[in-house]
Image (cartoon, rainbow, N blue to C red):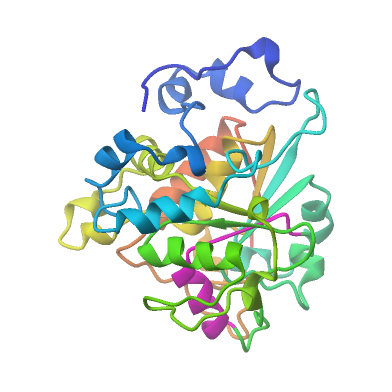
Amino acid sequence: MTDGSPSWSLQTEGRCSLRKAVHRDQQLRRHFNFSVPGLQWAGSFHKSAWQRLSNHAPPYGWEGMPVNVVRSSLALLNSPVSSVLFERPHEAQCVRCAVVGNGGILRGSKQGHAIDSHDLVFRVNGAVTTRFADDVGTKTSFYGFTTNTMKHSLILYYEEGFTQVPQGPEVRYIFIPSDLRDYVMMTAAIQGLTVTSGEDAGDRPWRYFGFKPPEYFKMIHPDFITYVTQRFLKSPLQRYRTGHLYMPSTGALMLMLALHTCDQVSAYGFITSNYADFSDHYYDSVKRPLVFFANHDLKMESWLWDVLDHKQVLRLYKRTGGS
């Protein structure tokens, strides 16, 4: 991982690129490094990568994982587009992305049309769209998750309408490698096979994702998670006894991935300073307060989104009042 200014030229950036806002701000230039790989792919696995990343526990590396499982899993990400999030139809296109969190701020927001008007839409975890199209839209380009958060969401929010993960011909799936099971699940999904080992043994991934070729599956790079944590979300929670549990939230990683890939990014349903005015999720049948746990620092994330919004790197949806 390098340290310094982003490795790109303003001459090659589109007129709408958020990178111009980064370039204009000295503080942001010290934090952003657009050369850090966002995704793993077949070429990510080699001897030196294994020697380095096997010394770091997930999600920051491969410590404790069988080398053959990691190697064989990443070898399946061998499509010409596996190393990139998306291909641009033409170089000058301004790619506008919406990243949709599940915060209660979206209930009654009537932001569905605005969200769906973006070129690409990211959703995460319990991404309920049934009955909430007016507020959150229906378009999904990328669905981001860990195997654990996906399966828990299908259980916890089933009664609220999350009966299956987003599916359709345009949906790509972004795994966050928080555990060995993410590599195992992705391998079975690409191969169209039942999971044969581990906590998810017996799972049939096509029930979640359908049958899709390798280019529909992405996996975030451990180096990117390390970079986001160290440069943007280095939380005091890491110093506590439970610090080994800490990592950026699923929504934070999706939003940061979009900021390092898209030209314009809008964030909807993310925590804002008046989070207490709203329910935890927009699909909650009764109002529930947001609960903070040791594995994420949502207050630090809220501060970061506010700073990036103020500096015009992203557009953060805010509103007053409660729901």
Location of residue 72 by image quarter: bottom left
The quarter in which the C terminus is drawn is bottom right
Q: Residue furthest bottom?
A: 159
User: Which residue is depicted at the point 15% across and 61% down?
Assistant: 241
Could you tell me residue 115's position as x and y percent? 77, 54
Q: How many marks?
A: 0
Compare residues 150 and 67 and report the one nearer the observer. Answer: 67
Could you tell me residue 216's position as x and y percent? 67, 54
Q: Is residue 144 left or right of residue 263?
A: left
Residue 189 colored in magenta in the image:
no
Location of residue 278 by image quarter: bottom right
User: Which residue is depicted at the point 75% across and 36% down?
Assistant: 95
The quarter in which the N terminus is drawn is top left
* Rendered position, 298 above or below 118: below
Which portion, as a residue range, is magenta? 140-157
* Rendered position, 211 above or below 6: below
Q: Is residue 122 left or right of residue 92?
A: left
Q: Is residue 258 left or right of residue 14?
A: left
User: Which residue is depicted at the point 37% across and 23% down?
Assistant: 2
Residue 145 colored in magenta in the image:
yes
Compare residues 90 and 253 and report the one nearer the observer. Answer: 90
Whether residue 33 is visible to the viewer of this picture, yes or no, is yes
Whether residue 272 is visible to the viewer of this picture, yes or no, is no
Q: Is residue 123 left or right of residue 177?
A: right
Could you tell me residue 261's position as x and y percent? 62, 35
Could you tell me residue 66's position as x and y percent? 30, 58
